[in-house]
Amino acid sequence: MDAARPAVRALLFGNFAIGAGVMVVPGMLADLAYGLGVSVPTAGQLITLAAFVTCVGAPLSAALTSRIDRRALLVGALVLYAAGHSACALAPGYAPLAAFRAITVVSAAIFTPQAAATIALIVPPAERSKAVSAIFVGWSIASVLGMPIGNLLGAYAGWRWGFGAAALLAAVAAWSVARTIPRGLTGPALSAAAWREVAGNRLLLGVLGVTLLSAAGQFTLFAYVAPALKAATQASASVTAALMGLFGVFGVIGNMWTARHIGRRGPDRAVSTSLAAILAGVGFATAITLALAPELLPPQVARPAVWALLLAACLAWGLGCFAMNSAQQARLAAIAPALASASIALNTSGMYGGQAVGAALGGALIAAVGIGALPWAAAALLGVTFWLSSRLRTDQ
């Protein structure tokens, strides 16, 4: 894979720019709500809207762009991302921001799945799983920097600077991809028969269902992690950003370890291990709600317990979160390599569709019950996800 390393690095950075643009909104959600004069659940609808557009756009873009030169497609998506985030930074109010955001995230629907499909055209078949996992490391790095920097920029400079930073990253990524991806690469045409083949493959559909449920479970809590951390710790923006950064550091470690060992362990084991870690992390988050119950623990015991549980949640959830996504893509590519462009696009659709469902569910729970209900709902959904994934065997 040595000859393909520049392309891998460029697509990794492109995924980082895409991920940073997606994660910047959850990172500065409370500041967005305050700056726009809306409630936190209303601001959270920006996450739901973006996730819904990406969910619908990923398979459509795969179907409509298969014959477009990969270099032109990926660079164009990043240029649109840069322009869209610039428009978001200048939005005069909530409604225009929502419209700009919906247009901007079309780029995410295009870039992430097509970057995976593109690197599969460049590297030898034996290196495909490793390369696909490697470029997704960019997403986990985005969690290290995207959310905490968004949180800090939102708190100390204003939410507009968060969108401005995302625009700058996308512009640099467009330049990098333009320099390294060769011209003339096109994917196989995705005919109606190819989509029917995906729809008729129960194993592929099961794996896609795991992605959908996992994203829904995680984003029930993750979409509101900034206000949830504030409610649990009463900490400053700097401390909250540090916790988000710690989560991201563990995300990078987990994803890099998975990318290094997935060829030996196989995608099934990689997904199972990652889901177990996510479920453990959310389990620690549910324990935080118990520690904060005054009838269970006195304040002098509850506060140290909350911080210990937060660190454990960051460790476990971080190690599994992004590793699981990259392992799922490798899982799909291993099942049906010829359908990878379609199945990975649908995987992206499932990931963002789950985010939309989770963000909407979380907002409804906050309005109806309170923010303390979120970890419990997330844990229930992730338990179902683990059960479903454990019944799928793709490496036999």
Image (cartoon, rainbow, N blue to C red):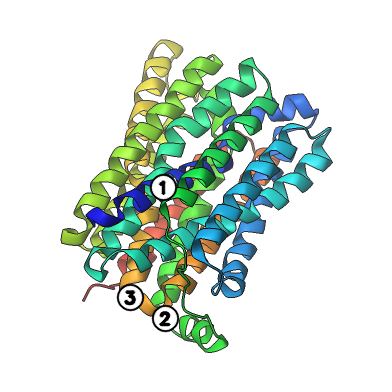
Return the x and y of residue 219 as percentages of the image width and height: 53, 46
Q: Name above or below for residue 190 compared with residue 237.
A: below
Return the x and y of residue 259 as percentages of the image width and height: 27, 51
Dot 3 or dot 1, earlier in sequence: 1
Q: Amino acid at mark 3?
A: Ile
- Kindly identify the residue that appears in the image at 46 percent across and 30 percent down: 145
Inter-mark Cα distance, 3 to 1: 26 Å
Instruction: Look at mark 2 in the image and give the residue it sits on.
Output: 202
Q: Secondary structure at mark 2?
A: helix
Q: For mark 2, does the 10 Å Cα neighbourhood hold few (<14), some (14 to 19), or many (20 or more) residues?
A: few
Residue 92 lies left or right of residue 148; in this view the side is right
Instruction: Look at mark 3 in the image and give the residue it sits on.
Output: 335
Residue 33 lies left or right of residue 14; in this view the side is right
Q: Name above or below for residue 85 compared with residue 188.
A: above
Q: Secondary structure at mark 3?
A: helix
Instruction: Look at mark 1 in the image and give the residue it sits on.
Output: 10
Q: Nearer the viewer, residue 244 or 227?
A: 244
Q: Amino acid at mark 2?
A: Arg
